[in-house]
Amino acid sequence: MNFTITGSLGHISKPLAGTLIAAGHQVTIISSSADKVKAIEQLGATAAIGSVEDVAFLTAAFSGKDAVYTMVPPNFGASNIREFIAGTGKKYADAIKASGVKQVVNLSSIGAHLDGGTGPISGLHDVEQTYSKLDDVAIKHLRPGFFYINFFGNIDMIKHAGILGSNYSAETPLVLVHPNDIAAVAAEELQQGFTGKSIRYIASDESTAENLASVLGAAIGKPELPWVEFNDEEALQGMLQAGLPEVMAKSYVEMGDATRSRKLYKHYFNNRPSSLGKIKLEDFAVEFAKAFTR
């Protein structure tokens, strides 16, 4: 089979491409950076260099493929996060329609059933709605939980303040996922095929914030590492001091509020997947410890 994958050589796209290539499929990887061509070709894929905001480029990259994998790349410089994500989704949809591709696996997110109040996830809700209007195209929306690797961004907090925290309480339930488990599901869906329009939740493990802090703390030799709940203003100021752009920081505070209120995960817990991914919190803790000691 012949696939096009967006996301360059990112945390999901690279292992996804590797799995598909190992299975004997042809893979084209879209990247905005010409510097990635050599690495893409060494992986055994074909590089397509261009912008995901260029519909003509996307159409050419999607044409003649059995299926495509779409994901909206991060843009920390966007003045309106939701509009950027939704706009990119619209360009993908235009290219899908123009190219005639009939199957699409799309990276969405847990919480994408909600129209607003979820930070950057609101834009992924809009993408799902845009794709729903594509006639005669099978769409599988992947809704993963919170990426383990996002906690790498909290390493400085642990080192300098001796705490781990966010704007939700220690008792808050969390749905966690490793990018490799997402890649495995995406590869499965692309290869097995599907019909209609549907969603699939992906989780590697479930925890509470308090247990998360305990497991990561134990892995780095800080078994008493506490989870601390911040108010929204404290969370915002902390992210700004860490160098995050204000628009993105405010968006993440909103996502934290949706986590705190439990609305972000409500639909997931009412529609749990039949099985979880392979990489458990304790497995990720080993990765976290290596990053912590670098």
Image: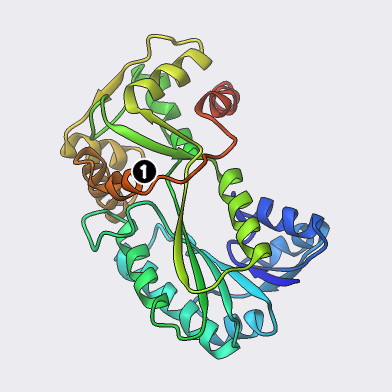
Q: Quadrant of residue 207?
A: top left
Q: Residue 219, relative to residue 196: is it above or below? A: above
Residue at 52% of width from left, 39% of height from top? Answer: 276
Residue placed under numbered mark 1 in the picture: 243
Whether residue 24 sits left or right of residue 61 in the image: it is right
Q: Nearer the viewer, residue 258 or 74?
A: 258
Q: Badge 1: few (under 14), some or many (20 or more) residues near its Cα, within 10 Å? A: few
Across and down, in percent, residue 18 comes to 74, 54
The answer to whether 242 is drawn above or below residue 209 in the figure is below
Left or right of residue 36, residue 261 in this image = left
Asked if 32 appears above or below 58 in the picture, the reply is above
* Image quarter of the N terminus: bottom right
Q: Position of residue 246 (x, y in %)?
A: 27, 52
The answer to whether any part of residue 31 appears in the image is no
The foreground one among 278 and 92 is: 278
Q: Where, by quadrant of the figure, is residue 158 drawn? A: top left
Residue 108 horizontal/vertical position (percent): 43, 59
Q: Secondary structure at mark 1?
A: loop
Q: For the point 48% across and 85% down, which residue is it?
A: 94
Q: Position of residue 176 (x, y in %)?
A: 44, 38
Is residue 205 visible to the viewer in this orientation of the structure? yes
Q: Residue at x 34, y 27 (%)?
A: 208
Q: Quadrant of the C terminus?
A: top right
**Three-letter code, disc 1:** Gly
Q: Is residue 290 left or right of residue 274?
A: right
Counting every numbered tag in the picture gives 1
Residue situated furthest front in the rendering: 274
Outermost bottom residue? 98
Colouring used for the render: rainbow
Up/down of 226 relative to 173, above or below: above
